[in-house]
Image (tube, rainbow, N blue to C red):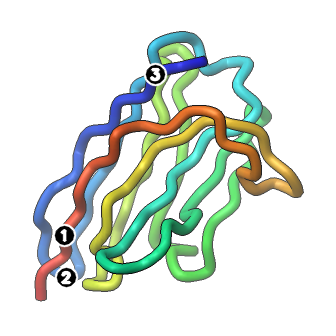
Amino acid sequence: QVQLVESGGGLVQVGGSLRLSCVASRSIFSINAMGWYRQPPGKQRELVATITSGGSTDYADSVKDRFTISRDNAENTVYLQMNSLKPGDTAVYYCCAGNANNGKLATIWSWGQGTHVTVSS
């Protein structure tokens, strides 16, 4: 088990950028996959980005070429750099850890508490 704490959310204007951070309570070196989900208001939670222990990444089509996921094993931290933000990116963003299937997070066994991102027009 690992505890995950997100930070970096906030209010940003359309076209702006934010970087979310997720700090784990222990080493993430051996964690098969980590990633970010988001839950827009009134909608279901959706997978945004995955990064595996080998460094492979995968993105939802809606964020491809705008978002970048990365991991710093030395700092036990996963990041989500979000650029060219749109109102549709408004959501609670959750960091998670688990196992991947075909490069995407599939089995989640730890969730963070979430951080709010609001994109205003």
Q: Earlier in the sequence, mark 3 or mark 1?
A: 3
Residue 10 x/y as whole percent: 15, 56
Taking the view exactly as shown, the residue that stands out farthest to the bottom is: 121
Residue hosting label 1: 118
The label on residue 82 is none
Asked whether the beta carbons under mark 3 and mark 2 sit within 8 Å of each other, the answer is: no
Q: Report how far apart the C-alphas of labels 3 and 1 lie in the structure.
A: 25 Å
Q: Report how far apart the C-alphas of labels 1 and 2 lie in the structure.
A: 10 Å
Q: Is residue 21 above or below residue 23?
A: below
Residue 16 x/y as whole percent: 21, 71
Asked whether the beta carbons under mark 3 and mark 1 sit within 8 Å of each other, the answer is: no
Which one is in front in this view, the residue at disc 3 or the one at disc 2? 3
Q: Secondary structure at mark 3?
A: loop
Q: Residue at x 57, y 47 (%)?
A: 35
Q: Earlier in the sequence, mark 3 or mark 2?
A: 3
Q: Is residue 53 above or below residue 117?
A: above
Residue 52 x/y as whole percent: 73, 40
Residue hosting label 2: 14
Q: Residue at x 23, y 57 (%)?
A: 116
Are there few (<14), some (14-19), or many (20+) residues within 10 Å of tag 3? some
- The image quadrant of residue 11 is bottom left
Q: Along the horizontal axis of the image, is 90 left or right of 33?
A: left
Q: Residue at x 74, y 32 (%)?
A: 53
In the rendered structure, which amino acid carries the disc numbered 2?
A: Val
Q: Secondary structure at mark 1?
A: strand
The label on residue 3 is 3
**Nearest the camera: 28 or 55?**
28
Q: Earlier in the sequence, mark 1 or mark 2?
A: 2
